[in-house]
Amino acid sequence: MKLRIEIQDDCDEDEIIIKCSNVNENIRQIQSYIQSLTTPKLIFYKGDQEFYLALEEVLFFETEGEQVYAHTKGDAFRVRHRLYELEDMLSRIFVRVSKGTIVNISHIYAIGRGLSTSSQIQFIGTHKHVYVSRHYNKILKERMQERGAKK
């Protein structure tokens, strides 16, 4: 395995690219380690308790009044970030689907086509659902196709 670091003066953002002939266990471990360094650590709140959940457990983030909530399969927790902040912090598996909602595409089970301007997203293993506005529908479909190509 070779390691090469290139320094570019005109680089706006650091980027890590892994070139490999196949994704084996070593590559997965490297990917996991890099993601652990770059994944934001969010604190989730419910009542007077703080919870430290993995972001992978979150189905979606949604605004309710002035608050933002992270929904898991069985619960909802308050977070102390605005949606636009979360959108900048989170990885590409999280996609904005409406003015008030960001979803984790790895948990999407189905997207129902509605007769109105929005479609309904259903998640794996739960009754919870959210709606995709027409404005964000194209972006969601692109990310879902990326997800399908990676599997």
Image (tube, rainbow, N blue to C red):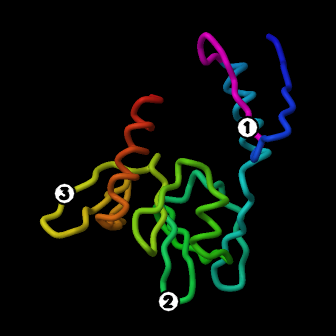
Q: CA distance from mark 2 to mark 3?
A: 27 Å
Q: Position of residue 56 (x, y in %)?
A: 58, 51
The residue carrying mark 1 is 15
Residue at x 35%, y 67% (from the top left corner): 130
Residue lying farthest bottom?
65
Q: Earlier in the sequence, mark 2 or mark 1?
A: 1
Q: CA distance from mark 1 to mark 3?
A: 36 Å
- The quadrant in which residue 81 appears is bottom right
- The quadrant in which residue 82 appears is bottom right
* Crowding at mark 1 (Cα within 10 Å: few <14, some 14-19, many 20+): few
Q: Position of residue 38 (x, y in %)?
A: 75, 47
- Is 17 displayed left or right of 108 in the figure? right
Q: Quadrant of the N terminus?
A: top right
Image vertical order of residue 48 relative to residue 56, above or below: below
Label 1 near label 2: C-beta < 8 Å? no
The residue carrying mark 3 is 113
- SS at mark 3 in the image: loop
Q: Quadrant of the C terminus?
A: top left
The residue carrying mark 2 is 65
Residue at x 25%, y 67% (from the top left corner): 118
Q: Amino acid at mark 1?
A: Glu
* Crowding at mark 2 (Cα within 10 Å: few <14, some 14-19, many 20+): few
Q: Amino acid at mark 3?
A: Arg
- Is 39 displayed left or right of 69 in the figure? right
Residue at x 71%, y 64% (from the top left corner): 42
- SS at mark 2 in the image: loop
Image vertical order of residue 151 relative to residue 131, above or below: above
Q: Earlier in the sequence, mark 2 or mark 3?
A: 2
Q: Amino acid at mark 2?
A: Gly
Residue 107 in view of the camera: yes
Q: Main secondary structure of the magenta part?
A: loop
Q: Position of residue 141 (x, y in %)?
A: 35, 47
